[in-house]
Image (spheres, rainbow, N blue to C red):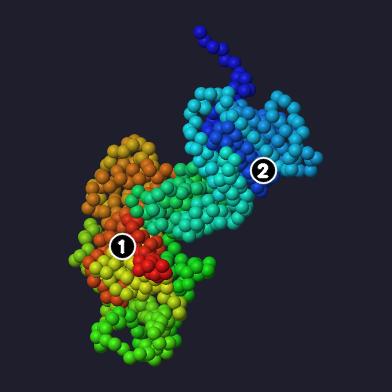
Amino acid sequence: MRNPIRPLPDLLISQIAAGEVVERPASVLKELLENALDAGSTALRIDLEEGGVALIRVTDDGGGIPKDELHLALTRHATSKIANLLDLERVATLGFRGEALASVAAVSRLTLTSRERGAPHAWKLTDAAGEPEPAALLAGTVVEMRDLYYNTPARRKFLKAAATEAAHCLEAVKRVALSHADVAFTVTRDGREVLRLARAEPKQRIADLLGASFLTESVEVDADAGALRVTGLALRPTAVDGAKEVQYCFVNGRYVRDKLLQHALREAYRDILHGSRQPSWCVFLDIDPAAVDVNVHPAKTEVRFRDSRAVHQFVFHALRQALATPIAQAAVHAAAQGGAAYAPRPPVTPAVPAAPAPQQGALGIREPAAPAYAPRPAGAVGKASGQPSGQLPRQDWASRPTPAQAASYLAFVHAAQETRVDIGASGLSTEALYVSAEEQPAVPSQADVPSAPAVAGVDGAVAAAQAAPPVRSAADDNAPPPLGYALAQLQDMFILAQNAQGLVIVDQHAAHERVLYEELKAAFDGRQVASQPLLIPVVVRADPLLVAAAEEHQEELAGFGFELSAAGPGEVAVRAVPVLLGRANPAELVRAVLDALGQAGDHGAGRELEAWRNELLATCACHGAVRGRRPMTVPEMNALLRRMEATERAGSCNHGRPTWVQLTTEQVGAFFLHGR
């Protein structure tokens, strides 16, 4: 028998809505916190019992609710935050639908107590059908929810243990607290205080919630472009340890899990993060409310951007640039913030450029003239050093090497790099920094790539990278450069250097690989890749959607050396391929390109194709870099250290492995129980 169509009762409608909004106690807490923040609160207190199932009480010091509006606050789709479609299209508050309190009240016992600013006393409403009663409250609003799902026992069976639900509630508080550092939070669980946060600066709030190590091991992100601005912190690739990932993304103060933003942030870590490790970040995107639609998900955790591609590119480049800061520039920034004392200053021109440039040509280690254990005259040490007897003369950075030697040496290196003279005659050979043509793998190439300047295969690409003017990295007059000066080479694989902090250990192959990779990318960026026309076009069968995507992105594909056109509803004609890949199978090559187009989505095909190109350049750099077990002279090691300081993303190689590590003097001393 057919059931007639009939309207549902209001209580059932609210219970259905609660199924979408009230997933668990943490969902209730999130809605109550958002309402409190929209009311202008500066301090919030949250009380939980039995993981939030038995009790969730949120007390705020906001503007309060008038007596005659308490009933409306518990009515579905009643709100003070929007009034028309224009307001809905420019939502600037965390809440806007006006259904949270009504949904919560439909599946729990809800009590609402509020005092409007200037009112003689507060009013309390315990039943949506009842009347408000006078109550005692200093200011603001108290929302008390008890016995969640008491009238829908089937839903209550899906809840987890009290400890698990409490953890989800604390996570909800953490997300809100991260984006509202100017608000104080206090959380109690079963009568015991578990979290207290005072009002603080955004960085301090991040340190309080994510740990001080997250703050010190992160790079700062701060970029703006018109109505877009992104700020926050992102963990350095070398600091990612594979433990629990920390990924918080906020849009206009609202925590979101947006696939487009997640993709942009992950792409910024491409080729600098090792293996399956997950990056960590806490970023805040500020955007014109009219340019983002927040009304796309019941829990308001997803958004839709009007110009998604522009937002993707902006966030990607902002984080990419922050992660790419060269070591020398990072040292300058650290010094400006009161950090490392070894930060280099701008290059200083030597007073007498033509003077002979002293080099760190030897380590100064030689056999003693006397037996190692020969007795010395009493007081000899003190007389020789000018210090009291029995004390060894102290060595500092001003004497090893001297400031003049340091500046002179660096000036010599910079002059050699800029003029590209035969520096081998001056004692600084690059033989160990670039492998010979015979040792480099051949890359299929029949023409110049790119067209200007000429680059043929790996050999030409490395030559072009060498020809590019390097970024200078100079040291302070009285301090070593960030990576210090080379001391020795360990097992012909690792460079040992000394800086102001202590010992620096560098993986010579990984470090040079990153240097070459960044130089190769710089040589190719902004230039159109040369194409090799095919004598007979190759027809490739593909999905009609991919064929349409290939036509739409013809200009981008041409920039990478591909010439494709539609040959039918499900066919693509390949007329040209990049010269660098001229010997590859055109059909397989284009299928890979079409797959990249299919994965590109809203963020464009250029990003996928650029990543694909970079993989090829990374392979070239890996094979072209100095190998392990390759002896290097001290000047060669120092030259590599200086190039690392001026190279973007020099902290990790193309595969995401670290290129260098720092051991402080205290850490080295701890091996020998110093200070114990």
Q: Which numbered circle lies on residue 296?
A: none
Q: Helix or strand or loop: what does disc 1 sit on?
A: helix
Task: Please say whether residue 539 is visible from this viewpoint.
Answer: yes
- Above or below residue 229? Residue 669 is below
The picture quadrant where one finds residue 11 is top right
Point 27% across, 69% down: residue: 490
Outermost residue toward the top in this view: 1
Number of on-image labels: 2
Kind of residue sitting beneath label 2: Asp
Q: Residues within 10 Å of mark 1 (few under 14, many from 20)?
A: many
Task: Say left or right for 601 vs 97.
Answer: left
Q: What is the x, y in percent for residue 62? A: 69, 44
- Is residue 583 toward the left or the right of residue 95 in the image? left
Element carrying mark 2 = strand
Along the horizontal axis of the image, is 268 left or right of 275?
A: right
Q: Which residue is mark 2?
A: 60
Residue where numbered disc 1 is placed: 510
Residue 372 place in picture, x, y as percent: 26, 83
**Which residue is at a point 61% across and 46% down the rendered structure image?**
186
Q: Is residue 295 in sight in this rendering?
A: no
Q: Nearer the viewer, residue 30 or 193?
A: 193
Of tags 1 and 2, the one toward the viewer is 2
494 up-or-down from 81: above or below:
below
Point out residue 469 in the picture as x, y percentages from the top left corner.
38, 71
Residue type, numbered disc 1: Ala
Query: Residue 650: percent from the left, percent from the top?
Result: 38, 63
Task: Give whichever of discs 1 and 2 has the lower sequence position.
Answer: 2
Q: Quadrant of residue 474?
A: bottom left
